[in-house]
Image (tube, helix red, strand yellow):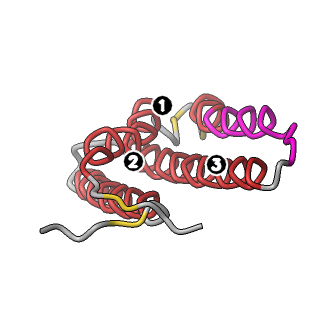
């Protein structure tokens, strides 16, 4: 029988799995760069996208905890729209970095690898999120 996982541990298990994927792909991209198969912007774009995607996911966890505290203590929170706009701002930051940060017309961050790295946590949630055997956390 599979050991049950606490609901509070699931976000960190997903983040751990995402870091494994981020590390493997970053290592492969840097290896391909050093073998002269890919430009460095692919690896740097992947690292930037991984960082922003992870920050966004941690911000979602923070936002969910703040909303749960508000419901539990019957506090109205007007900050929810601010949280969503700031998460959108993180994604826009990666897009703007890929567009405007250039050295001698050479791109530093590849826009496609940034967006692929954004999707890793979503894919891990989709692939493994339904497979966790959860128990309800105690209040």
Q: Is residue 34 visible?
A: no
Q: Is residue 28 part of the magenta span, yes or no?
A: no
Query: Looking at the image, which is closer to me, 41 or 128?
Result: 128
Residue named by callout 2: 40
Residue named by callout 1: 111
Q: Which residues are magenta?
A: 75-91
Do the CB atoms of the residues marked 2 and 1 lie less than 8 Å apart?
A: no
- Residue 12 rendering spot, x and y as whole percentages: 45, 63
Disc 1 crowd, CA 10 A, few/some/many (<14, 14-19, 20+): many
Q: Is residue 97 above or below residue 135?
A: above
Query: Looking at the image, which is closer to me, 45 or 51?
Result: 51
- Residue 92 rendering spot, x and y as whole percentages: 65, 31
Q: Is residue 30 visible?
A: yes
Query: Looking at the image, which is closer to me, 94 or 130?
Result: 130
Q: Residue at x 86, y 48 (%)?
A: 75
Q: Upstream in the sequence, badge 1 or badge 3?
A: 3
Residue named by callout 3: 64
* Magenta residues, dominant SS class: helix
Do the CB atoms of the residues marked 1 and 3 lie less than 8 Å apart?
A: no
Q: Is residue 90 part of the magenta span, yes or no?
A: yes
């Amino acid at each position: 029988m599979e050991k049950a996982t606490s609901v509070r541990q699931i976000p960190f298990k997903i983040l751990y799995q995402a870091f494994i994927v981020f590390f493997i792909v970053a290592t492969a991209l840097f290896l391909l760069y050093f073998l002269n198969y890919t430009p460095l912007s692919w690896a740097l774009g992947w690292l930037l996208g991984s960082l922003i995607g992870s920050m966004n996911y941690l911000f979602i966890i923070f936002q969910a905890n703040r909303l749960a505290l508000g419901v539990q203590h019957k506090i109205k929170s007007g900050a929810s729209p601010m949280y969503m706009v700031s998460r959108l701002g993180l994604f826009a930051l990666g897009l703007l970095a890929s567009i405007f940060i250039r050295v001698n017309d050479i791109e530093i961050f590849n826009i496609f690898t940034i967006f692929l790295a954004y999707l890793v946590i979503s894919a891990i949630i989709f692939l493994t999120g339904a497979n966790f055997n959860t128990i309800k956390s105690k209040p």
